[in-house]
Image (spheres, rainbow, N blue to C red):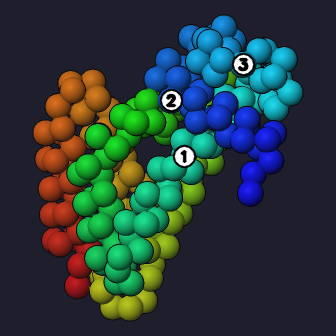
Amino acid sequence: MLTKSEHTKLHILRTVAPIFNKNGYAATSMSDITKATELTKGAIYGHFKNKETLSVSAFKFNVKQMMSKITEHLSTSDSPIKKLYLISDFYRNYYSFSKKLGGCPVLNIGVDANNQNTLLLKNVRIVIERIQDQVASIIEDGIELGEISSEINAMQYAKRLDTLIQGAIFMTYTMNDDYYMEETMDQIDHMITNEMRL
């Protein structure tokens, strides 16, 4: 059971996370935040030290939603090679899912923070490294189980997959056309089948 304070904090994050994600850190003002949450600055600062702390918490909130969906999707199989196909399967529907978050948090906040917010950028890099580590672990498990070729460099392929996915997300959002996502996921499936699978 959440306390009143925890409820308020959750309300702030749920409301503000898509706004930060869509508009960016600099373009989101405290008046935008107070208007959206229907809370005073004092009430918001009672839960978050400053706007930067709130933006980092909002980013983490969006990432947690994204990661829990991916984890849930991957949990439908114990096979590492099938998990790789499930990653591309998840991203085939990512465009509609991520719209609820205000866009892709990793891509949006990464680009937004790159030149203006080192704390946010540091958090984005941590998330990217975590995602790549998790994919590399799946590949390593597949090599151990004899599902994936031992010639494969797990981290190199994890980075390649992540790069293809992030590029597809960028193009899909920029062009408002999920052809880019579908086509890239087909390429990833082809790579899994023809380069990685034993």
Which mark is drawn over residue 63? 1
In the rendered image, residue 171, in percent from the top left (x then y), is placed at 25, 31
Residue pictured at 27% horizontal, 24% vertical: 174
Residue 158 is drawn in which quadrant?
bottom left
Kind of element beneath mark 2: helix
- Quadrant of the snapshot with the C terminus: bottom left
Residue under label 2, please give it: 18
Secondary structure of the residue carrying tag 3 is loop
Residue 53 vertical position relative to residue 136 in the rendered view, above or below: above
Q: Which residue is mark 3?
A: 39
Above/below status of 150 relative to 52: below
Of residue 192 and residue 80, the one placed in the foreground of this image is 80
Residue 49 visible, this angle: no
Q: Nearer the viewer, residue 33 or 29?
A: 33
Q: Residue 12 in the image: state x and y as whole percent.
A: 67, 31
Whichever of callouts 3 and 2 sits on the residue coming sooner in the sequence is 2
Tell me if mark 2 has few (under 14), some (14-19) or many (20+) residues whose alpha carbon lies within 10 angstroms of its own.
many
Of residues 157 and 129, which is closer to you in this image? 129
